Each structure stands twice: as C-alpha cells, then as structure tokens.
C-alpha cells in the first residue's frame, strides 16, 4: 500500500503507512523489518531531494539490521543517497557502502525475508553503477551497468 501511494505521488499517505508498519514491526520485535521500513522512509526522503535526512535515517537503520539481505539493501540505499548528495568527502563513504552491500549480498545467500527477497546482484549492479555515475566515475560505472 505504501509503495502504491508513493508511486502515485501521495507522499504523506505513503509515509503514514510506513510509520504505521514501523510501529507494528516494533511491537513484533522484528528489528530487520523495522530497519527495512526505515529504509523505505529514507528512500522517500532521497527521492524528494532530502539526502541529509535519508543518510541519517539509513545510518540509524543499519544499527538495528542483523540479516545480511537487509543490510545489503540499506547499504545500497545509503550509497545512492550519499552519491546524490555529492561533495568531496562522499566518495570514500559511497565506496565503503557499496563494498559493504556486496559483502552482505554474498553473505545473504538464500536467507532473505519475504519483504526483501527481491534484492539481487542486478540491484547491486544498477545501484552501484548509478552511485558511481553520480560521483562522476563513468568508466567504473560502465563496468557495473
């Protein structure tokens, strides 16, 4: 429902749905689901150009996530938002996040919750390539894309 609202441009309703789901994940003591939902809220913030908020939310979510697939998804989103934010100090942080995402994807194997079972090597390649393009690294980005 939240992604449907997001896709329609109804960002307030999408946020409300994600926050309600976050409360449910907290009540169920599902830290990874909660971290994933924070990742969705951060994605929305980044989509709307608020990369500072997105990075802050993603860094917090990473302190809660334990499952490698969750950590992979969060690291990919962090790399993308840091790259989009730009700035001279971001390159190292982006590369560190991409390397962590790659490691977590390898560690995940088939152990993925249903809500992030879709995370794959293709997502790693596309998000890595786009982050590198955002940083101006076209040669390396082409390798990923």
Image: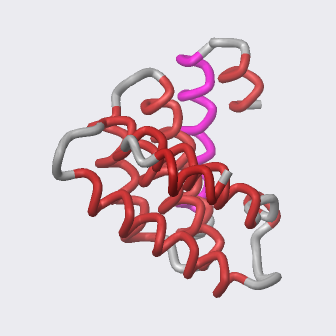
Region of the chain picked out in magenta, as a range: 11-27
Above or below, comparing residue 88 to residue 76 in the picture: above
- Which residue lies at the image location 77% right of the left edge and 31% below the top edge? 1
Which residue: 80% across, 64% down?
Answer: 117
Characterize the magenta stretch by its predominant secondary structure: helix
Residue drawn at x 46%, y 49% as measured from the top left:
132
Residue at point 33%, 47% (across, down): 55
Q: Is residue 9 left or right of residue 66?
A: right
90, 36: nearer the viewer: 90
**Where residue 114 sits: x, y (%)?**
82, 64
Q: Is residue 44 above or below residue 122?
A: above
In the image, residue 104 lies in the stretch drawn in magenta: no
Q: Position of residue 81 (x, y in %)?
A: 41, 42
Height in image: 119 above or below 69?
A: above
Does residue 7 appear to the left or right of 78 in the view shown?
A: right
Most foreground residue, 28 or 73? 73
Which residue is most to the left? Answer: 89
């Amino acid at each position: 429902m939240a992604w449907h609202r997001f896709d329609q441009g109804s960002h307030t309703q999408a946020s409300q749905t994600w926050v309600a789901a976050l409360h449910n994940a907290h009540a169920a003591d599902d830290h990874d689901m909660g971290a994933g939902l924070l990742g969705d809220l951060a994605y929305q913030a980044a989509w709307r150009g608020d990369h500072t908020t997105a990075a802050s939310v993603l860094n917090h979510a990473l302190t809660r996530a334990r499952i490698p697939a969750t950590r992979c998804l969060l690291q990919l989103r962090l790399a993308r938002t840091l790259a989009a934010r730009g700035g001279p100090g971001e390159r190292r942080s982006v590369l560190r996040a991409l390397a962590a995402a790659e490691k977590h994807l390898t560690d995940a194997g088939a152990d993925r919750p249903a809500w992030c079972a879709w995370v794959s090597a293709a997502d790693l390649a596309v998000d890595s390539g786009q982050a590198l393009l955002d940083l101006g690294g076209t040669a390396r980005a082409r390798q990923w894309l």
